Image (spheres, helix red, strand yellow):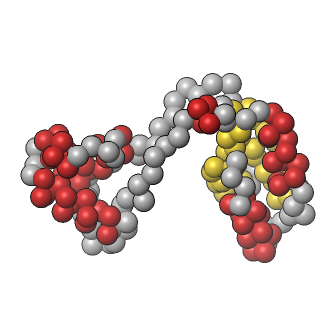
């Protein structure tokens, strides 16, 4: 985000609303933020230019596309050298079933979030995409029983 960009109360309100429903009209957004359509449009453009917003997407319900299972996989690397990390990260980015990859602290080096059809899918990804890499020492998998809370909305507070 541009360092000279200030997130005011209006920008914070706009960002909070759009995170929950990016399909609302500028007119409705203006009404919900007690501002004009021109002001809302201009603020959205400023926030886009500042890098506050990622490209707009439509979220898919995993169960509706036959991917009802979430699994998290902790990965321990054999080595932390630059080449090993780069190879691992490129390999994970190339796997569609892995929707999130985090470099983490603690006993494990990475946390992977998989969205899959079933346990054989998890096994396929782990055995043939993760554990096959020479740089990976070990992995441990956690299976999600039920999503209790899932949101993509980030709390937005104004800078002032």
Question: Taking 29 as reference, is 132 above or below it?
Answer: below
Residue sitting nearer the eye, 140 or 26 = 26
Look at the image and tell me in which quarter the N terminus lies.
bottom left
Q: Is residue 77 left or right of residue 86?
A: right
Q: Residue at x 63, y 49 (%)?
A: 99
Residue sitting nearer the eye, 111 or 125 = 125
* Picture quadrant where residue 84 is located: bottom right
Query: Residue 81 in the image: x percent, y percent?
Result: 79, 72
Look at the image and tell me in which quarter the C terminus lies.
bottom left
Viewer can see residue 106? no
Query: Residue 78 in the image: x percent, y percent?
Result: 87, 61
Viewer can see residue 63? yes
- Looking at the image, the residue that sits furthest to the front is 65
Q: Residue at x 13, y 58 (%)?
A: 39
Question: Taking 90 as reference, is 132 above or below it?
Answer: above
- Looking at the image, the residue that sits furthest to the bottom is 83
Q: Count the marks.
A: 0
Residue sitting nearer the eye, 85 or 68 = 68
Q: Residue at x 23, y 46 (%)?
A: 25
Question: Taking 114 as reference, is 90 above or below it?
Answer: below
Q: Residue at x 19, y 58 (%)?
A: 41
Query: Residue 123 in the image: x percent, y percent?
Result: 85, 41
Q: Is residue 39 left or right of residue 52?
A: left
* Picture quadrant where residue 95 is located: bottom right
Q: Is residue 90 left or right of residue 134?
A: left
């Amino acid at each position: 985000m541009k360092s000279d960009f200030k997130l005011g109360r209006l920008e914070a309100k706009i960002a909070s609303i759009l995170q929950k429903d990016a399909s609302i009209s500028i007119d409705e957004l203006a009404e919900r933020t007690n501002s004009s359509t021109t002001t809302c449009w201009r603020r959205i453009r400023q926030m886009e230019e500042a890098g506050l917003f990622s490209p707009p997407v439509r979220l898919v319900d995993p169960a509706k596309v036959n991917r009802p299972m979430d699994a998290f996989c902790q990965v321990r690397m054999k080595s932390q050298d630059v080449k090993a990390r780069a190879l691992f990260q490129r390999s994970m980015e190339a796997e569609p079933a892995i929707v999130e990859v985090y470099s983490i602290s603690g006993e494990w080096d990475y946390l992977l979030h998989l969205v899959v059809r079933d346990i054989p899918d998890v096994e396929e990804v782990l055995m043939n995409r993760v554990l096959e890499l020479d740089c990976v020492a070990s992995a441990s998998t956690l299976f999600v029983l039920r999503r209790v809370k899932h949101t993509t909305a980030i709390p937005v507070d104004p800078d002032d």
